[in-house]
Each structure stands twice: as C-alpha cells, then as structure tokens.
Image (spheres, rainbow, N blue to C red):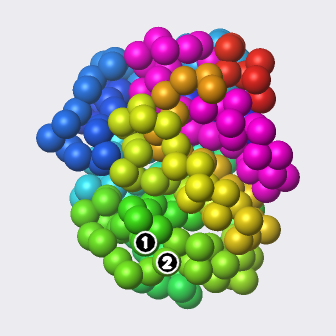
Amino acid sequence: MIILPAIDIRMGRVVRLLQGDFTKETVYSGDPVNMAKKWEKDGAAMLHIVDLDGAYLGKLKNLPIIKELVSAIKIPVELGGGLRTEGEVDNAISCGIKKVVIGTRAYTDENFIKKLVRKYRDAVIVAVDAAGGEIISEGWKRQTSIKAKDFIEKLCGFGIETVIYTDILKDGTMKSPNMDSIKEILDSTTCRVIISGGISCLDDIKNLVALNRKNLAGVIVGKALYEGVFTLQEANKIV
C-alpha cells in the first residue's frame, strides 16, 4: 500500500473540489509542476493527476502542463480526466504517463476497455466512482444503476488489474472513508484497489492498513495534505 498525493488541475491551477462540485473549488497552487516536485521531494512513490477540465468536457485540456509535470519528476504518474478515446490515451502514454485512468467510457463501451487492455495491459486503470454503492459517471454528473462491486468483478474478467474506488459522498469532505463499503469492495474482488475519498487524519490511514488486505494497493490523499493536517512523511511511515 502506498500514499498517492493528488494533483487535480483546473484551468492550469491545483485545486480541490468538494464532492466533485465545480462551484465548490479551493485553489491551492497556481503551479502544478512545482507541486509535483514538492510531493516527489517529500517522498511520494507515485502521483495521482486529474485533468478536471478534461473530466468535465470529455477530452484532455491540460496536457501541455501535464507533459511538463511528467518531465520535471522521476516518479511515475497516473492520469485521469477526459480519457475517452484511444487517441487521448495514446497522447497521455506518449507524454510519459505510466498509468491511464479510464472513467466514463469504461461504463459505456466494454470493447473500448478490452482493446486498451490488449494494447497497454496493466497500464490501464479504471476509476470506479460511486455514491451509495452505485456508479457515477461523466465527471460525477450522471447517476447510474450499475453496482460498483458488480462492475469491478466484470472488469477483472476483462483483464483489468487495478481499479480506483472513490466514494464521491466522501471526496473532499475530510469526514473519513466509509470503511464498510471499502471492506465490501476489497472482499468482492481480486483486483488491486486504490482507495480515494475522505481521508481526514492519520487514523484513517491506520484503519486502512489495519484491514490487512493484500489487494489494497494504495490510497489517494488530497485535501488533508494540502490543508496540512498531516505530512506525506508521516503518512508514509504508517504504510
């Protein structure tokens, strides 16, 4: 299990949204590249980058900044937000992105995911964003009736090795993760799972570690780090 600092980029700035709401934005930096350098210096093993404009519009919008960011650091980067065509995925990979995170298109086009897995294998991650156990898609704008755990099981059958599970009711709230839903997801799949949403303190990370699940691959942390609730070094000591 590793800690993945989140860098969410909107209009060229590092921001955090409350539960994915674009009207509830907090700006933390005007320089995503320097932020990436900071997290690398502080001991990050990997970064989680989201092109929020891309997620909203359905195509990458901050690729020049992301390309500069990737070139400025040595640690691997996973990227999500707007990756809805093979061409967009190719662009991201060619810029040095190690893992591409597919969201909306994964729910609407199974053949697309299967094709990406054949082409890029374990470089493909699927973002499973859920509220009340059901998938939310299109940049968290559309509720579906797809059960998260059922969808993850299907993804495993397609050859997906890693998913990012986000409880959007917790994301950006710093009210602690929903441990019951996390345990349910971890117990229902052999896929590697990265948890996202609600990390508020070091005890939350300790609770995840205490689950002792081999398929718990990491946890994405955003607001708690940016607000200085704890440091990346403190979190890394726990994991």
Residue drawn where x is 64% and y is 64% of the image: 185
Q: Quadrant of the C terminus?
A: top right
Q: Which residues are magenta?
A: 204-232
Q: Looking at the picture, does residue 113 appear above or below residue 65? A: below
Q: Residue at x 48, y 43 (%)?
A: 197
Q: Is residue 14 visible?
A: yes
The reply to whether callout 1 and callout 2 are in contact (CB within 8 Å) is yes
Q: Residue at x 60, y 32 (%)?
A: 204
* Amino acid type at mark 1: Glu
- Element carrying mark 2: strand
CA–CA distance in space, label 1 to label 2: 5 Å
| Of residues 172 and 7, the one drawn nearer to the viewer in this rendering | 172
Disc 2 target residue: 147
Which amino acid type is marked by label 2? Answer: Lys
Q: Residue at x 31, y 46 (%)?
A: 19
Q: Nearer the viewer, residue 84 or 96?
A: 84
**N-terminal label among 1 and 2:** 1
Q: Which residue is mark 1?
A: 134
Q: Secondary structure at mark 1?
A: strand
Left or right of 35? Residue 205 is right
